[in-house]
Image (spheres, grey):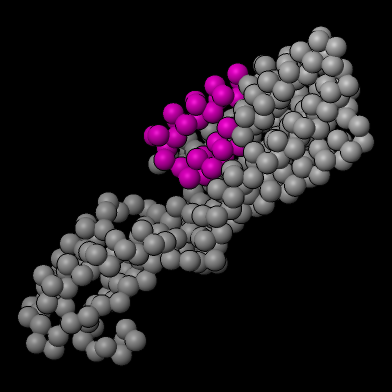
Amino acid sequence: MSNRGEQALLKQSTFLMLVVTFAGIITGFASGAQSILFDGFFSLVATFIKVLMLITARLIAKESNQRFQFGSWHLEPMVLVIEGSFLLLVAIYAFLNGVFGIISGGRDVELGLVIFYAAVFTVVELIYFFYVRHRNRTLKSSLIQFDNISWLVDAMLSAGLLVSFLIALLLKTQGYEKWALYVDPMILILLALGMLPPAFKIIGPALRDVLGIAPDQLDDKVRQVMEEAKIEHGFDDYISYVQKHGRACFIEIHIVLPTNYPLRSVVQLDALREEISAKLGKPDAARWLTISFTGDRKWIA
C-alpha cells in the first residue's frame, strides 16, 4: 500500500467534504430545512474526522521511535472509534430534533432550493464514493475504506432528501399542504435511524482493536498452522498470542522443543521460522511476527 497515495486521497476527500459542509449549512439556513442543515453538520463532523485520519496516516508512515517503539498503528482504531461515536451522537441529535419538529406542528421549507441541492449532491457523492472505492482496490487502506463510508452515508442522506422533498412537493400541488409540513421532521427521523448501522459498523471492529481483543480469524489461522507444524516437526508444545491494531497484526509464537530434538545449528531454527511465517501469509510492514524456541516449558507458562 502506498502511504503517499493514501494521504493524497484523504486530502482530496477532506477538501471535497468541506465543500459539501458549507453547501449544506448555507442551503439549510436559506431554505429553513432542518434535514438539510443536519446533512451539513454531518458533513462538518465527517470533515473533522477526515483531518484526524490524515494526521494518523502521516504518523503511521513514520518509523517507530523510542516513545512509540511499535509505531503508531494503535492510533488508527482510536480515530475510527471517535468517528463512529460522532456519527452515533449526530444520529441521536437528529432523531430528537425530528420528534420535536413533529410535536411542534412541522416545518415549512423552500422546496425548489432543497430539491436542487439534494439532486446535485446525490450524484456528486455517489460518483466520488465509487471513485474512492476503485482507488482503494490498489491502496488497500482500512483508513480509506472506513473514511469512504462517510461518502456513502452522505449520498444516502442526499438521496433520501431528494425523494422525500419530491413527495412534499407532490403533496403541496395536490392540496395537502398541511401534511407537507411534516415531511422535513419525518426525513430527519428516518435519516437518523439509517445512520445507526454505519455508526455501529465502524465502532464495533475499531473498539475490539482498541480493547486488544484477539481477532478470531487470525487466532484460528495461527493455531491451525502451528498444530500442523507441531505434528510435522515433532514439537512438544507451543503457545501463541495475537493482537490487532488497525491494519497492524502482532503475532507471538513460543515453541517448546523436546530435549532430544535433532538441532544442528541456529540456521535450522531460522528455517523453521521462515516456514511458519510463509504459512501464515505474505509478510509486510504491518505484520509483527515473533517466533521463539525453548526446551523448558516454564518459558511459555
Seen in the picture, residue 6 relative to 92 is either above or below; the reply is above
Q: Say if the magenta span includes residue 137.
A: yes
Nearest to the observer: residue 35 or residue 205: 35
173 on left or right of 144: right
The image quarter containing residue 12 is top right
Q: Is residue 30 visible?
A: no
Q: Residue at x 62, y 29 (%)?
A: 156
- The quadrant in which the N terminus is found is top left
In the image, residue 218 lies in the stretch drawn in magenta: no
Residue at 59%, 44% in the rendered image: 197
What residue is rendered at 18% in x and 82% in y? 236
Q: Which of 221/261 is in front?
A: 221
Kindly indicate the quadrant of the structure image that contains residue 223: bottom left
Q: Position of residue 259 (x, y in %)?
A: 13, 89
Tag count: 0
Chief secondary structure of the magenta portion? helix
Quadrant of res 273: bottom left
- Outermost residue to the top: 173
At which x and y percent is residue 181?
A: 86, 24
Q: Answer left or right for 178 relative to 124.
A: right
Residues in magenta?
Answer: 123-152
